[in-house]
Structures are given as structure tokens and as C-alpha cells.
Amino acid sequence: MPLKPNCPVIAIEEHYWDQELAGHAATVERNASITERLFDLGALRLKEMDEAGVDVQVLSHGAPSAQKLTGADAAEITKRVNDRLADFCATNPKRFAAFCALPTIDPAAAAHELERCVTKKSFKGAMIHGLSNGEFLDDQKFWPIYERAEKLDVPIYFHPSVPHPAVMEAYYKDYVKDFPMVIRAAWGFTVETATQALRMVLSGVFDKHPNLKIILGHLGETLPFLVWRVDNALARPGGKPMSFRDIFCNHFYITTSGNFSNPALLCCVQEMGIDRILFAIDWPFVPNKLGTDWIPHIPLCEEDKIKLLSGNAKRLLRM
């Protein structure tokens, strides 16, 4: 049987919940076992990491995080959430790092919070979940966040959340009762997040901020598979000139979270290159061992496996 290479395993999309923020977001998880793990920042989390061979988790708040906050206190709530997470990571920095939450209802405050978290609290970037109170994040009012991320040289991770209510009504209402995950990991998450990424490319934000880095989970939310077709279609006569493929492959990184498919991985490697793919599991929504049991069977050479499992994370996140 093939073996795991001799390197650390850094998983970069691993979630938790903060009691205060989860309460404000009216967050609900039907699976009590997952809820227990989301609120655990202690023995259970470490036990399951050790059992599966995960050396480091880069923690991030679960969806919808701060993207549902609407009040004038959004920035202060988010600051408290980030401070608690930073304090936890500081208790065991060899095993935990983090992406901060951002109060996107106030883009200027979000930019300042990103800088505070990176420069004062050792965060590795930020994670944003789905739409910000119904708005896609390519709108220019959100660009101060990306300007600050570029200045700090840290990535923004776009993570899914449930689709816009109008989309759920039009696309999924006939099936969501019998197949509740259709609006989540089975399909709705992918459509919404891939749409956000495509809109980011079309918006021109990467022309304005040429060193901005974006991360997508789940092997790129299908976009590596579609990038040639999207690029070719957008280049047909009548549209504004651009190279979708170049922009996507030069500004986006992707992770393996919750998508441990060898054919899909090889497609991503061929389209984007191994240097832009990072290991993640999506714990606790996906068990750690589902990800780490896959490692020996990944059809890559040892050098590329090391990049995937930790080398790329060390470089991108400066770990």
C-alpha cells in the first residue's frame, strides 16, 4: 500500500462556532454530533485530529459567520469573536492557526479588523461566508477589504453559505424537503460560491488589486473543470475583452475540503498546477479520517503530495 509522505498535514478549512456569534446568526445544525464538535475547542477536537493524523487545523467560524450581522454593533461583536479565537490558538500554536471573521456589513470596519487580526493577532487571512446580507461581495463597496488583504499579503477565503432566498424558492423548493442537503453541500453551496468567484473575476477587482489572493474550497466549486469553457464563451464577439482563465488561475487557490476525488483533483492539477492546491477536510461536517485515509491513494508524486499536504499552506499562509 502507498504511504503518506514524511511531512506535516495542515488542514485549512476546519470549523468551529463561537457561542455569541452563533446566537446572533440564529445558526442551526440538525446533527447534534456536529454541533458538539463545532463548539469544542478542546480535547475532542485534538483527539480526532490525532487519531486521523492531522497536525494543524487552520480554524474558521462556520457559516454564516458574521455575514448575517446587520447592526451598528457588528464590528464589536466580530472583534470579540476574533479575540476569543486568537486566545485559543495562542494556547497551542503548534496545532492551531486561524482565519478571522469580518463584519462585511461595514466594509471599512471589516478592512480595519482584517489588519488588526493579521498584524496583532497572527491570523492567516479571513474567511467570508456566502452573501453579505443578500449582496454579492464583488460590489465595489466591498473593495476596501480586498485592498487591505492585498496590502497585508493575505488571502480571503470564500466559503459557501445557503443560497439567496429567491434562488432557493425558484431552484430548490420542490426537492428541499426530501433532500435538505440540495441547498447546501450537495449543490446549492457550489452554485452560489462559484457564482461569487465568477463575479469577482468579471468585476475588475483583480485589475485594481493585481496581487489579491482568493481561496475556494471543495476543489474550486467546479470552476477548474469549467474554466476553459467559461473563458472560451466570454471571449466570443460582443463581450468586453478579458481572459477569465488567466485571471482565475493566477489569483485563485483551491482546497480539497470535502472533495476527495482523484479524477477531480487531477483535473485541478492540470488546469491550475499543484502549487495552487491546498489540503483541507471541512471538519466536523466531514470526518477527519475521510480526508487523511485518502492521502496514501492520491495519484501524485511524493514531492507534489508534500506541497498539497503542507508545503503550499506554509508558503501561502506563512506558517
Image (cartoon, rainbow, N blue to C red):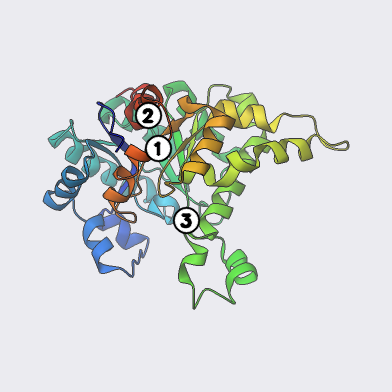
| Residue 228 on image: x %, y % | 69, 36
Disc nearer the start of the sequence (2/3) = 3
Tag 2–tag 1 contact (CB < 8 Å): yes
Q: Tell me the quadrant of the picture where the C terminus can be found.
A: top left
Q: Amino acid at mark 3?
A: Ser
Write down the residue under mark 2: 305
Q: Residue at x 40, y 37 (%)?
A: 298
164 or 23, nearer to the observer: 164
Disc nearer the start of the sequence (3/1) = 3
What secondary structure is marked by label 3?
loop
Q: Tell me the quadrant of the picture where the N terminus can be found.
A: top left
Measured Cα–Cα span from mark 3 to mark 1: 28 Å
Disc nearer the start of the sequence (2/1) = 1
Tag 3–tag 1 contact (CB < 8 Å): no
| Residue 78 on image: x %, y % | 33, 46
Left or right? Give the position of 38 relative to 94.
right
Q: Residue at x 51, y 64 (%)?
A: 183
Q: Is residue 99 visible?
A: no
| Residue 90 on image: x %, y % | 17, 34
Q: Closer to us: mark 3 or mark 1? A: 1
Write down the residue under mark 1: 298
| Residue 145 on image: x %, y % | 49, 34
What secondary structure is marked by label 1?
loop
30 or 135, nearer to the observer: 30
Write down the residue under mark 3: 161
What secondary structure is marked by label 2?
helix
Q: Quadrant of residue 301?
A: top left
